[in-house]
Amino acid sequence: MFVLIVGAGRVGSAVAKSALAAGHEVSVLDADPLSHERLDAGQSESWEDAKGQFTVGTALETDALIQAGIERADVFIASTAGDNTNLVIAQIAQKRFGVQKAIVRVMDPARADWYGEQGLHTISPTKHAIEGFERALAPDGE
Amino acid sequence: MYAIIAGAGKVGRNLARELISKDHEVTLIESFRPRYLTLEEEFEHAVQYGDATELWVLERAGIQRADLVIAVTGDDEDNILVCQVAKEKYLCDRIIARVNNPRNHDHFRLLGIQPAVSATDLILRLIEHEVPRYGLVHLLALEEERLEIIELEVASDAPTLGMKVSDIELPEGSLIISVLRGGTGFVPKADTVIEAGDEVLLVLDQGLEEAITGFFAPNGHPASI
């Protein structure tokens, strides 16, 4: 599978590394050239030596998306710091480039729910945190 | 009419002022607290603090009953989000979005966010109007009278080439007033034949330039090419 990940923060870079280790072809796009360091951190060989791809550019630039290989991506992961950026680029991936699967990180649970109903695969870390706290607060056995 | 305006920068707040002065109901939404506090003195209850891309903020502003949602923040993704949610979740009839970076215009179109207004595109269109295609020159615009006088160089592929002035059926509201040929101008008679390279002066109603250009310089280039 070819996986394109936009946004190499904590989440994006970790998912990129595990996807590469799982044998997928992985391309990462980030506006900050220094974010590349997160891809190398803790690895025995560099991201490129491990056959990972890295492109510097912003996600709304069509040229950058094409350079990062969006035209042949099977999965698109939007994990930049901005909810709205993620929601917009995931829809561009689906509607303009016909990417089959678009997975979007959305901090705001309300937007994650609504866009989930509209056909995007949304993941809301906030929702997971709330649920985790609620579980931790609940008395044992309830 | 009830309008919600996301983003209270120069565009948003001046739109709000205009709409309020025309007796429309307006809610401005601003997420930058210092700006909100300043604007609250002027707009009072008509400005609300919050991020207009949050659904509860839009609901608090009464998006369910809004007739018009205008997204004019400085961020294109935010403007797309506000309009998309207004249109598709809250079924608002009318949306207007601002495009900050003209290269994002395609994204607005792709996601059905129309109309999307870009100041850069508007100014470009004005420049194109002021500096039209080669071959057409605006000599005089009588704004009040809604008339203008233009000059066109007759192209070698003009449909009017070799025609007598009396045989040329120009649209209503236009008239050939002079022909410049070989450096001298004359007022054409009914049997004057149009030649390539002639410069034709016409008086016309505003808005006819494009139609008239087709008669003398259909591809916008002069006879000499």
Image (cartoon, coloured by chain):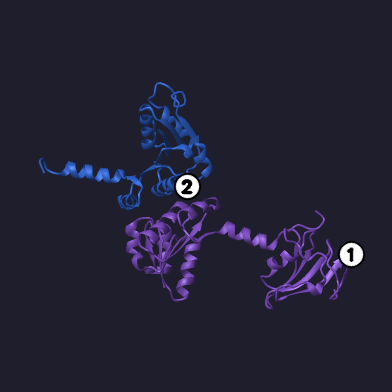
**Does any portion of residue A19 appear in the rendered image?**
yes
User: Which chain contains the residue that carries disc 1?
Assistant: B
Q: Is residue A19 above or below residue A137?
A: above
Q: Residue at x 51, y 56 (%)?
A: B99
For disc 2, the chain is A
Q: Provide residue B49's location: percent of width, then percent of height.
A: 37, 60
Q: Which residue is mark 1?
A: B183
**Observer-nearest residue: A92 or A79?**
A92
Q: Residue B154 or A60: which is nearer the viewer?
A: B154
For mark 2, what is the residue? A96
In the rendered image, what is the letter of the chain coloured blue?
Answer: A
Of circles 1 and 2, which is in front? 2
Measured as percent of width and height from the top left, residue A39 is found at 42, 30
Closer-to-camera residue (B41/A123): A123
Amino acid, disc 2: Arg
Residue A31 in sight? no
* Co-location on one chain, circles 1 and 2: no
- The outermost residue toward the left is A141
